[in-house]
Image (spheres, rainbow, N blue to C red):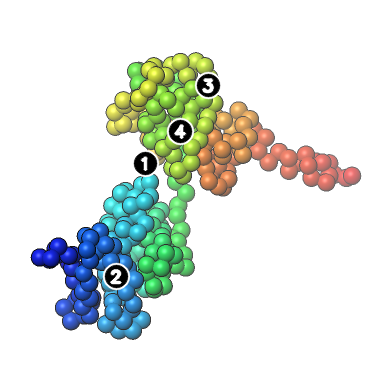
Amino acid sequence: MSIKKLDDDLYEVDIRLGGRDGKRIRRRFEKKGEAVAFERYTLANVSKKEWQSGAGIERRKLSEILELWWLYHGQNLKNGIIERRQLNKTVIQFGDPEINRLNKRVILEHRTQRLIGGISAATINRDIYRISGLFSALIKVEVLDCPNPFKGLPPLAEKQPAMTFLSKPEIKKLLEVLSGDALRLALLCLSTGARWGEASSLRAEQVANGRVTFLDTKNGKNRMIPISVELEQEIRKQDFGGLFKVDYEAFCNTLRLVKPALPKGQASHVLRHTFASHFMMNGGNIVALQQILGHASIQQTMAYAHLAPDYLKNAVNLNPLHGKLSI
């Protein structure tokens, strides 16, 4: 397919659907923008018989569907570029098949091969969820007219990752060996439960009046957390601009020196776990913790509930016998 400018200053769209032997569509426009819009519209909305060599069979490749997703949906997402990069990896892993060749058996075999190759169930589930979302988005806006081959596929059972946190002596040791921006960043994470990305990208404008506002959050929603006057004075060393310049690898290496048994992939995240764990051990409310951490579901936060000193204590106090053997 192509758009070319003619001698009379018109723009001609020349599209061949379904390869060399497919239907040919030509249109001329006065403006290039109109030609581009028509080309995109035709690509997305042409009927099945024009696109396919067999009725009801979608023969476009997965990579072509990815380009449609980017054009009509992906580029409008906050993390669209990252999502596109991850989706492209998944397309390559599947071997870029035609859509009509994707079915439950093919997907199950793909998952099995990745498991055999040492890829975790959690990673595979994320990849499948992401590409299923690609189909759902295009089907919703009627750019794609075929069933979602990933819909209804049960996820792989995931092992719950090991979760650890720093004890008070370990916190003390960490704060003693850190300095400068690395120390201030650690203080912020330990005081707010912020993720590394949220904290490391913090700007001075986001810290004011005893509160810090995290903007670059995982769920896309702003989150405001109270902080002490002392911490505000310690981290807000300027009136505008980024507050921290910290080498991530060096920071993680320091964490591992303080706590060598850190679970894989949880180096900087241990500070978030440390905040949440001590929050509950000190009598914090689980619902309040959910709001502070920015969890979309209370189920995520419940991982810390057992650390509360009065966890499930009400099972004794509030049952109809009130802990006694008779009424």
Within 10 Å of disc 3 (Cα), the crowding (few <14, some 14-19, many 20+) is some
Residue on which the image places disc 1: 264
Q: Disc 4 vs disc 2: Cβ atoms closer than 8 Å? A: no
Kind of residue at disc 2? Thr
| Residue at disc 1, secondary structure | loop
Residue drawn at point x = 31 percent, y = 67 percent: 41
Within 10 Å of disc 1 (Cα), the crowding (few <14, some 14-19, many 20+) is few
Kind of residue at disc 1? Lys
Residue on which the image places disc 2: 42
How far apart are the alpha carbons under marks 3 and 4? 13 Å
| Residue at disc 4, secondary structure | strand
Image mark for residue 210: 3
How far apart are the alpha carbons under marks 3 and 2? 55 Å
Foreground tag (3 vs 2): 2
196 and 42: which one is in front? 42
Image mark for residue 33: none
Residue 228 position within the rendered picture, expressed as x and y whole percent measured from the top left: 53, 19
Considering only order in the chain, which callout, 1 or 3, is on the residue closer to the N terminus?
3
How far apart are the alpha carbons under marks 4 and 2? 42 Å
Residue on which the image places disc 4: 214
Residue reaching furthest bottom? 55
Foreground tag (3 vs 1): 3
195 and 274: which one is in front? 195
Q: In the rendered view, tell whether residue 226 sits above or below residue 264.
A: above
